[in-house]
Image (tube, coloured by chain):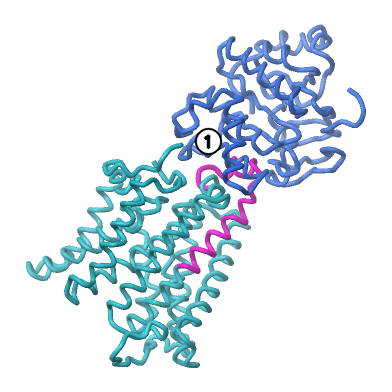
Chain colours: A blue, B cyan
């Protein structure tokens, strides 16, 4: 990691009633970098996403994007500042077409309908949803809906894209394809990506850097090779059972 | 399916729209005065439904108190005319401003304190009822005694002063309804229309895509209220008498929402179709009811129509009819 990071998370913490969901977590994502946030269910990955994207405000700590403090901004403000996010529990605009869903995102970057339509069409093409453009979003399969989430977020022209388990439910060949899509995206556009994922195949292939959370705390970070060898990581994954399963909180 | 934002007109759709406008323009010349008066009621219903549809059909915020804005528009323009001789159209502009402020304030208060869904709907009823009772005691506009506009027997229709025959009001309302259709089409095809529909479908997702949900919801309410108030102004000069208990009536609020629901919530033409069917058939029912000496046939019919729609065609009649007529929004 070099120079000033694009996204910097400084000692953020969030407590829900008795549960310390995120505890003093710090990490950074460089421009054009792909960083994975991993950990067992309930480790605090989605809460960390919500803290960065403004869906919830941290109890302490700060979030900096391009050197600007965006801590505690509303989600729409965070989006306009350059944070594009997906939801793990997908939220398509069911009554609209796939193209219209993505156009809603594109309207953040332009008020012109033709320009929004074209930008949306290009993104659908990139994410392999072009043939579904005119389908109602509610008719999509779950893996397609996950990709729609990514497409919509991407259309807002973010500086950093937060992907919350977009590979879940994909077949291995589809995973490889999405890995290619996102690494090409980062290379071609310089967009940074922060992702959470249970599919280790994707995490290892995609990320430059991995941050491991456990019980809300960062227990380790480094390159995929370093993390895979870290005894603490092995302990938390193997010692406590499965690394995959139902969605974490 | 609900309101896909309409695309540009295909030739087939343009022809259908042209035919509709032509029929509506010629209709009052071919029928008797009684039918014209029924058609006026149809157009009031269509126009109020279209105005309400922006708020509830497009932006997804259920208002059950739109009689409030009918009343504010009616009373503002009528009172300014009676007391100051202000030209009705200027008074209607003032009424639109009052209604937009009231609607915007109610929306802002509700959404600021995260009142949504059914609780928001209840609040809209509360404000309408509260205002009705307030006007019952508002002496300047006649309170329960009513507010009356002087009836002038003119040889000619005077659209500028809104004095004239039902036929003049028919054409005036037809123009308003077509303007509302054009405005709705225009808005649905712009960023604001996409944003409203996104908010209707999922507020959290809309917010994450950079949409200032609060602002767009308040704007939808203010616009819907202002449009409704314009119709309220016309209603005042058509009826010539205003009583709080009828102008602000809960039953009016319910009537306003029935036509768009039957026709197709969130669609462009649904409110118009619903108004034609409901008011037209409702009038037949009233006549039947009088002839057969069975009271309340119309109310039975309204209830049955709502039940049938909810059970059989919940997205409304227009999406179904549109498919049948091959008038679905074009694809590119």
Q: Is residue B291 above or below residue B61?
A: below
Q: Nearer the viewer, residue B16 or A216?
A: B16
Q: Quadrant of the N terminus of chain B?
A: top left
Is residue A54 shown left or right of residue B54?
A: right
Q: Nearer the viewer, residue B300 or A23?
A: B300
- For image coordinates 27% across by 60% down, the residue present is B276
Q: Position of residue A5 (x, y in %)?
A: 87, 31
Q: Residue furthest right?
A: A3
* Secondary structure mainly formed by the magenta segment: helix
Is residue B45 shown left or right of residue B60?
A: left
Q: Is residue A163 above or below residue A71?
A: above
Q: Is residue B4 above or below residue A141?
A: below
Q: Position of residue A9 (x, y in %)?
A: 83, 33
Range covered by the magenta-colored residues: B200-227
Q: Residue furthest front?
A: B11
- For image coordinates 50% across by 69% down, the residue present is B226
Q: Position of residue B286 (x, y in %)?
A: 17, 67
Please check the rendered image and state whether residue B223 is part of the magenta-colored stretch, yes or no.
yes
Is residue B125 shown left or right of residue B252?
A: right
Q: Position of residue B157 (x, y in %)?
A: 32, 85
Task: Please give the residue where the numbered disc 1 appears in the rendered image.
Answer: A99
Please check the rendered image and state whether residue B220 is part of the magenta-colored stretch, yes or no.
yes
The image quadrant that residue B67 belongs to is: bottom left
Q: Nearer the viewer, residue A80 or B106?
A: A80
């Amino acid at each position: 990691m070099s120079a000033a990071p694009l996204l910097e998370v400084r000692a953020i913490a969030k407590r829900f009633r008795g549960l310390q969901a995120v505890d003093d977590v710090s990490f950074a994502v460089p421009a054009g970098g792909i960083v994975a946030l991993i950990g067992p269910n309930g480790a605090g990955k989605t809460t960390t996403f919500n803290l960065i994207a403004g869906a919830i405000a941290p109890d302490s700590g700060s979030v900096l994007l391009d050197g600007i403090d965006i801590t505690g901004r509303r989600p729409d403000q965070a989006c306009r500042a350059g944070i594009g996010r997906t939801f793990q529990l997908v939220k398509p605009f069911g009554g609209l077409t796939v193209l219209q869903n993505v156009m809603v995102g594109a309207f953040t970057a332009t008020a012109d309908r033709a320009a929004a339509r074209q930008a949306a069409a290009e993104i659908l093409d990139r994410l392999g949803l072009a043939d579904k453009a005119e389908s109602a979003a509610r008719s999509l399969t779950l893996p397609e809906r996950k990709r729609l989430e990514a497409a919509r977020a991407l259309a807002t022209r973010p500086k950093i894209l937060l992907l919350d388990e977009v590979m879940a439910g994909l077949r291995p060949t589809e995973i490889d394809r999405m890995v290619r899509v996102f690494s090409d995206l980062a290379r071609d556009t310089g967009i940074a990506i922060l992702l959470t994922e249970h599919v280790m195949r994707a995490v290892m292939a995609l990320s430059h850097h991995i941050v491991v959370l456990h019980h809300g705390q960062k227990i380790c970070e480094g390159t995929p090779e370093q993390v895979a060898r870290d005894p603490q990581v092995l302990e938390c994954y193997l010692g406590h059972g499965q690394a995959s399963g139902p969605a974490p909180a | 399916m609900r309101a896909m934002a309409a695309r540009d007109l295909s030739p087939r759709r343009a022809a259908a729209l042209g035919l509709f406008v032509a029929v509506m323009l010629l209709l009052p010349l071919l029928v008797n005065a009684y039918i014209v008066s029924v058609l006026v009621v149809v157009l009031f219903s269509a126009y109020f439904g279209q105005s309400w549809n922006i708020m509830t059909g497009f932006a997804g915020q259920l208002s059950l108190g739109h009689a409030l804005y009918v009343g504010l528009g009616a009373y503002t323009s009528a009172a300014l005319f009676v007391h100051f001789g202000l030209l009705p159209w200027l008074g209607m502009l003032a009424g639109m401003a009052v209604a937009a402020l009231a609607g915007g304030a109610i929306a802002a208060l509700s959404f600021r304190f995260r009142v949504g869904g059914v609780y928001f709907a209840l609040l809209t009823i509360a404000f309408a009822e509260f205002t009705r009772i307030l006007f019952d005691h508002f002496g300047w506009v006649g309170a329960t005694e009513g507010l009356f506009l002087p009836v002038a027997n003119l040889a000619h229709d005077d659209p500028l002063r809104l004095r004239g025959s039902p036929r003049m009001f028919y054409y005036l309302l037809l123009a308003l309804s077509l303007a509302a259709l054009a405005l709705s089409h225009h808005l649905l095809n712009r960023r604001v229309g996409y944003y409203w529909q996104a908010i209707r479908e999922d507020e959290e997702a809309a917010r994450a895509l950079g949409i200032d949900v609060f602002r767009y919801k308040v704007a939808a309410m203010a616009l819907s209220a202002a449009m409704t108030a314009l119709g309220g102004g016309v209603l005042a000069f058509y009826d010539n008498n205003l009583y709080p208990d009828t102008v602000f009536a809960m039953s009016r609020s319910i009537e306003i929402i029935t036509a768009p629901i039957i026709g197709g919530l969130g669609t462009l033409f649904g409110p118009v179709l619903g108004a034609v069917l409901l008011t037209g058939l409702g009038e037949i029912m009233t006549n039947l009811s009088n002839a057969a000496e069975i009271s309340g046939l119309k109310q039975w019919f309204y209830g049955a129509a709502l039940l049938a729609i909810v059970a059989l065609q919940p997205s409304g009649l227009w999406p179904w009819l549109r498919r049948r007529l091959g008038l679905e929004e074009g694809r590119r």
